[in-house]
Amino acid sequence: MSLCGLQQTKPLACRLWPFKILHKPKYGFPHQAAYYYGNQKLFVYADLACNGLTFGTPTKEFTRYVIPEFIEMVYGKRQRQFKSTGFLRPVNPFLGLEL
């Protein structure tokens, strides 16, 4: 599995990809894309070019934790990702152990 080596310094666009968080429906399917965050109705779309997507009904974990994390990054309430990305642990190249 390969992960981005820039996890801590990725630009916002890279941290959000493949998702777009919009205030108005833009790509159709407004009922399926609608997501309520507090009292705001937002629309969440995924870029179909991402080959890591699984299509179907979102899991409860994705809906409850991942989407809000993306929204908080858009609004500047959060910088770090926990649920919406993978992290590489540093490895000591001499011992092969995780640091």
Image (cartoon, rainbow, N blue to C red):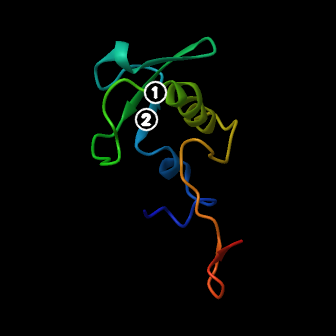
**Where does label 1 land, which residue?**
59
Camera-side residue of 12 and 66: 66
Residue 65, image quadrant:
top right
Distance between mark 2 and mark 1 Cα atoms: 18 Å
- Give 6 or 1, whichever is nearer the viewer: 1
- Tag count: 2
Three-letter code for the amino acid on which mark 1 is drawn? Thr
Question: Which percent across, then down, holds residue 69?
Answer: 60, 35
- Identify the residue at image location x=48%, y=61%: 3
Residue beneath the point at 57% across and 31% down: 71
Compared to residue 2, the image places residue 29 above or below, namely above
> SS of the residue at dot 2?
strand
Residue 81 versus residue 54: which sits nearer the camera? 54
What residue did someone put label 2 on? Answer: 20
Q: Is residue 69 left or right of residue 53?
A: right
Q: Quadrant of residue 37?
A: top right
In x, y percent, where is residue 35? 49, 18
Whichever of labels 2 and 1 marks the residue nearer the N terminus, that label is 2
Q: Is residue 18 left or right of residue 94?
A: left
Which secondary structure lies at badge 1? loop
Amino acid type, mark 2? Lys
Q: Where residue 84 sits: x, y (%)?
A: 54, 43
Contact, CB < 8 Å: mark 2 with mark 1? no
Counting from the top left corner in percent of width and height, residue 18 is at: 40, 43
